Image (tube, helix red, strand yellow):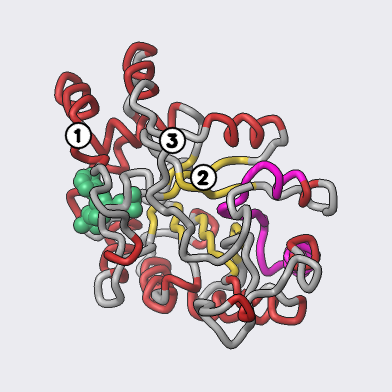
Amino acid sequence: MPILGLGTWKSAPGEVKKAVKEAIKIGYRHIDCASIYMNEREVGEAISESIKEGIVTRDELWITSKLWNNAHEKDRVIPALQKTLKDLQLDYLDLYLIHWPVAHKYETIMPRTKDDYFTESELSIPDTWEIMEEAVKIGLTRHIGVSNFGKKKLANLIANCTIIPEVNQVELNPYFQQDDLVEFCKLNDIHVTAYSPLGSNDRPKELKAENEPTLLEDKTLLKLADDKDISIAQLILSWIVSRDISVIPKSVNPARLKQNLTSADIKLFEADIKIIESINKNRRYVSGDFWDVENLWD
Ligand code: A2P
C-alpha cells in the first residue's frame, strides 16, 4: 500500500473528481474511498479517465473502500461491494474495510433509535467477516480489513476468522497518537492507516465539539514546522509516515495536494519526534457519539 494516499471523506461532489484527477496526475497512487462518502461515482470517473488518458494503469493504483453499517448482513455484503465496484468503475478493490464495528438495519443509512441497530447476538462482526473473506476468494478485493476497531474487538475477530484483518484504519494525529492500539496492531501484523491526520477541520458542524482545539494552529507544531521550513501539515504527515503508518490526508486544493504528497519524503530527527509526542492530548476529533452503541471503542 503506498504509504501516503488521498482521503475523499468530505470531498464534495462537484469537487472530488477534479481533486482525484489532479492527485493521480501529480503522483498519488492510493485513493481512500467509502460508499457513505456519497461520492464514489465521481471518484470512479476520475480513476477511469486517468486510466484512459494513459496517466496511470489500474495495477499502479491502490483503491480502498468501505462497507457501510447497513450492509453487514451476510446476503448484503457482496451486493454492497459490487455497487461500490460499479460506482468506482473497477473489477476489484485493493482493500475493502468494515467501516465501523456497528451494524444497523438496511433501511437506515443513519440509525435513529435503538431498534434500528442489530445486537451482537443478532449479527456479529465475525458473521460479516465470513463474507468479507468470501469477497477475497471470488476476487472482488485483494485485501480485507476493518476501521474504527479497538483492541478488544480486533482480538475477538482474530480469534474467529480465517484471514486476519490486514489493516485497521483509525483516527490518528498528534492530538490522538494511539500508541497502545498501534502497538497491538504491530504485534498482530495488522497495518494501521491514519484518518483525520490533520484534524479534519472541515467536518460538518454537527460532528464538532464546542471549543475544540484546532490541530493546524497548534503553537508547538507551528514553531517546529517553521524551524524546519516546512508546513505544519507536512510536519504532521511526515511524523505519521515515520511510524510506518499509512496516512490519507484529504484535500481538494492542488497546492495542498502537492504539499501533502511530498511529506512522505521528509525525514524527522529523534528530537522533532519527541516534541510531537509531547503534545498528545488523547483526544478524538471523531468522537463516535453519533452511534448509540456501548463500548464502541473497546
Ligand atoms: P482542503 O481540502 O481545502 O485542502 P483531514 O485530512 O484531517 O480530514 O483534514 C482535511 C482538512 O485539512 C481539509 O479542510 C483540507 O482542506 C485541509 N488540508 C489538507 N491539506 C492541507 C494542508 N497541506 N495545509 C492546510 N490544510 C490542509
Residue neighbourhood size for the residue with mark 1, other residues' Cα within 10 Å, grouped as few (<14), some (14–19), many (≥20): many
Could you tell me which residue is drawn at 17 percent across and 23 percent down? 223
Q: Is mark 2 within 8 Å of ligand 1?
A: no
Q: Is residue 32 left or right of residue 15?
A: right
Q: Is mark 1 within 8 Å of ligand 1?
A: yes
- Three-letter amino acid code at disc 1? Ser
Is 183 situated above or below 151? above
**Which mark identifies residue 231?**
1
Looking at the image, the residue that sits furthest to the bottom is 107
Q: Is residue 154 magenta?
A: yes
Could you tell me which residue is drawn at 58 percent across and 34 percent down? 182
Mark 2 to mark 1 CA distance (whole Å)? 21 Å
The quarter of the picture where residue 134 lies is bottom right
- Three-letter amino acid code at disc 2? Thr
Residue 277 x, y percent position in the rendering: 39, 23
Q: Is residue 69 magenta?
A: no
Mark 3 to mark 1 CA distance (whole Å)? 23 Å
What residue is disc 2 on? Answer: 193
Assign a secondary structure to mark 1: loop
Can residue 27 be seen at all in this image of the molecule? no
- Segment colored magenta: 129-155
Residue neighbourhood size for the residue with mark 2, other residues' Cα within 10 Å, grouped as few (<14), some (14–19), many (≥20): many
